[in-house]
Amino acid sequence: MKQVVMTAPGAIEIHEITPPKPGNGEVLLRIKRIGVCGSDVHVYHGKHPYTNYPVVQGHEFFGLVEELGGGVTGLKPGDQVTSLPQISCGKCDPCKRGDYHICETLKVQGFQAPGCAQELWVTDAKKIVRLPNSFTFDQGALVEPLSVAVHAVRRAGKLAGKRVAIFGVGPIGNLVAQVAQSEGAKVIVTDLSDYRLQIAKKCGIEFISNAATETFQVAVERNFNSRNVNVAFECVGVEQTVNTAIMSLEKGGTLIIVGVFGSKPIVEIGLVQDRELNILGTLMYQRSDYEKAIDLIASGKVKTEPLVSIHFPLDKYLQAYKFIDEQGDRVMKVIIDVAG
């Protein structure tokens, strides 16, 4: 059985290993598709602060149940599934209040624990989330990133009728925009990439703006006949966009920080105080976010097909990362085909 191991930044080896067996409370999965996410790319570049090498990556995936371990019920071989990648302690204060996704000792499969980049993979049955039989392999692999967006939008509260801005429409920003729109928000997205803005259009986002050709205030006035927005989502992780987001908000507005910041930004904190702005962080998701993500895909309220840029076979994992580097902002979601 093939297993992909990142042995060091930029270095990937494919090993032949003995297929694993599920223990009590575990499930053996046959992995079909794996999505490559931005955090995976950080690991590839050696810039992820919480990942050591060697590491087996893979945390957003579609799989089929292959075999059940002892005591596992409610599943059967052949079921289409994905799973939550968090490993939490269950004892810290966040876990006790139900916020296991921000556990004090959180580990994530594919980063601090082995991920699913192999043909057969074992995980805890309690983490399994069943997928509809109608789902394609690609749709199943996109449930995890969509769950990030679902959780981020939950953090903002009710959005129906509100003017909502999304800064950055890579895969996560695109999905945040689609989820916000499904909640009844009037959504505008801004980015420097015409390619990504056009993908947003294909996904049904009407109001788009290229930050290279117009200021965001002009874009808001042009599309909304207003000088500000009620809620903003920062999905880039850079100083300039977080400050533009702050300046775009109405007094009492809300900013959700979705992007991961590689360097410490200098923030217009005086405006936050003066305008009584709300700034909230968001991290990962919970099971309920997965369940809503599945419903959004199944109902057609969120489109995933336009986000998939290209597929690579398992033995071309390294080439997938090189493609991402070469294409830059002209690539969205790269999918690894583990099996047919």
Image: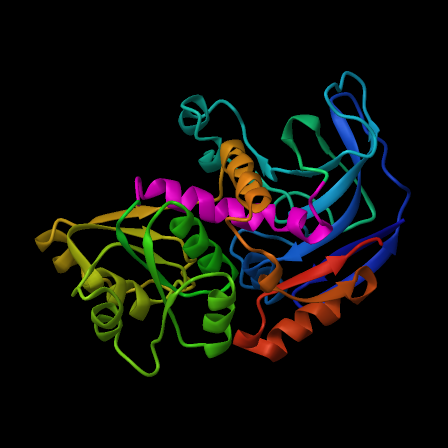
Q: Which residue is drawn at 49% across and 40% down?
A: 285
| Residue 140 in the image: above or below residue 130 | below
In the image, residue 150 lies in the stretch drawn in magenta: yes
Name the quarter where the C terminus is drawn.
bottom right
Q: Nearer the viewer, residue 245 or 218?
A: 218
Is 70 positioned to the left or the right of 296 in the image? right
Q: Residue at x 49, y 22 (%)?
A: 91
| Residue 244 in the image: above or below residue 122 | below
- Identity of the residue furthest to the bottom in this view: 213
In the image, residue 259 lies in the stretch drawn in magenta: no
Q: How many marks?
A: 0
Is 192 positioned to the left or the right of 8 in the image? left
| Residue 333 in the image: above or below residue 285 | below
Residue 73: % across, % down: 74, 18
Q: Residue at x 90, y 49 (%)?
A: 1
Q: Residue at x 69, y 60 (%)?
A: 335
Residue 295: % across, % down: 55, 39
Q: Is residue 56 visible?
A: no
Residue 167: % across, % down: 36, 64
Residue 81: % across, % down: 70, 37
- Identity of the residue furthest to the left in this view: 274
Is 179 positioned to the left or the right of 335 in the image? left
Question: Which range is magenta?
Answer: 134-159
Give the quadrant of residue 321. Answer: bottom right
Magenta stretch prevailing secondary structure:
helix
Q: Which of 93 and 229 is in front in this view?
A: 229
Q: Can residue 233 be seen in this view?
A: yes
